[in-house]
Amino acid sequence: MGAFDHKTPDTGSLGKVGSSTPADSFSVGGSIPECLKSGYNRRKFLSVTGAAAAGVVIGAPRAESAFFGLMGDKPVPGIPHAWVQAKGSDVLRYARYIQSLNLRNITPRMVLAPHFKTRGRIHNCLPPKSLWTQMGPTLKVIDKMVTRIGAPLREITSAYRSPRYNRAVGGKSRSYHMRNLACDIQFQGISPHHVAYVARQLRSQGFYKGGIGRYSSFVHVDTRGMNVDW
Ligand SMILES: [Zn+2]
């Protein structure tokens, strides 16, 4: 599969929570995500987003602790409560998995953020649980790239995409984003040309086998097990 993985940069809209700090500006857009747990009440959701903008994670109130305790999960630093409200406690479980990779330069929040994007009326989702660990090798490659480049990763613009969302952003019909094997990444002040160069360098040194796609504003990296460039 050597062709383009997607036609348009997946930088689609992220709704903002009114009074949030920039670090907490990711939210769930103007309407309820398709992956929202059934039975969740929209008015209740809207009423919690303001408080959730504070990203309450450490020293959570007792009621919240009880909720997480019940779910067998504790809050993960940096993950806004609104995200959990929107997509359920799997947000925390997936965040824990990402945390368990012990990455030096990538936070769970950075990986989770693209799952909250929308394109038009189509909302992205978390990956199904069976695909969670697919992302590990790709994140390890990117983590190593950040160290080698010596500049911080600005954003993971795209990670997992649901099939519907992939269609909405013009992704290839068999995109590795739908297998949770791919990320599109942007660095502040570092050209995609250089980012792709470092990705190829690590690949030629045997760190992974996969695809590298260079676009005007980002670089696609995946660990499909076969080397492909575009
Ligand atoms: Zn991509």
Image (cartoon, grey):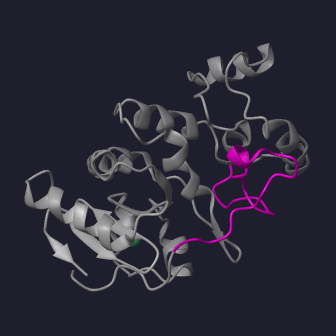
Q: Is residue 21 visible?
A: yes
Q: Quadrant of the N terminus?
A: bottom left
Horizontal and vertical percent position of residue 119: 64, 74
Count the labels in the image. Answer: 0
Q: Would residue 62 be found to the left or right of residue 211 on screen?
A: right
User: Image point 41% across, 50% down: which residue?
Assistant: 151
- Quick check: 201 above or below 75? below
User: Of 58 and 173, which appears nearest the observer?
Assistant: 58
Q: Quadrant of the C terminus?
A: bottom left
Q: Main secondary structure of the magenta part?
A: loop
- Quick check: 68 above or below 153? above
- Quick check: 73 above or below 42? above
Horizontal and vertical percent position of residue 33: 70, 59
User: Of 13 and 179, which appears nearest the observer?
Assistant: 13
Q: Would residue 135 be found to the left or right of residue 25 on screen?
A: left
Q: Which residues are magenta?
A: 10-38
User: Image point 38% across, 46% down: which residue?
Assistant: 132
Q: Would residue 158 be found to the left or right of residue 212 on screen?
A: right
Horizontal and vertical percent position of residue 70: 64, 19
Q: Is residue 209 visible?
A: no
Q: In which of the image's four quarters is ligand 1 placed?
A: bottom left
In the rendered structure, does residue 20 fall within the stretch colored magenta? yes
Q: Would residue 3 be found to the left or right of residue 39 on screen?
A: left
User: Of 215 and 47, which appears nearest the observer?
Assistant: 215
User: Of 193 and 182, which appears nearest the observer?
Assistant: 193
User: Image point 47% across, 71% down: which residue?
Assistant: 163
User: Image point 50% across, 77% down: which residue?
Assistant: 9
In the rendered structure, does residue 156 fall within the stretch colored magenta? no
Horizontal and vertical percent position of residue 157: 51, 63
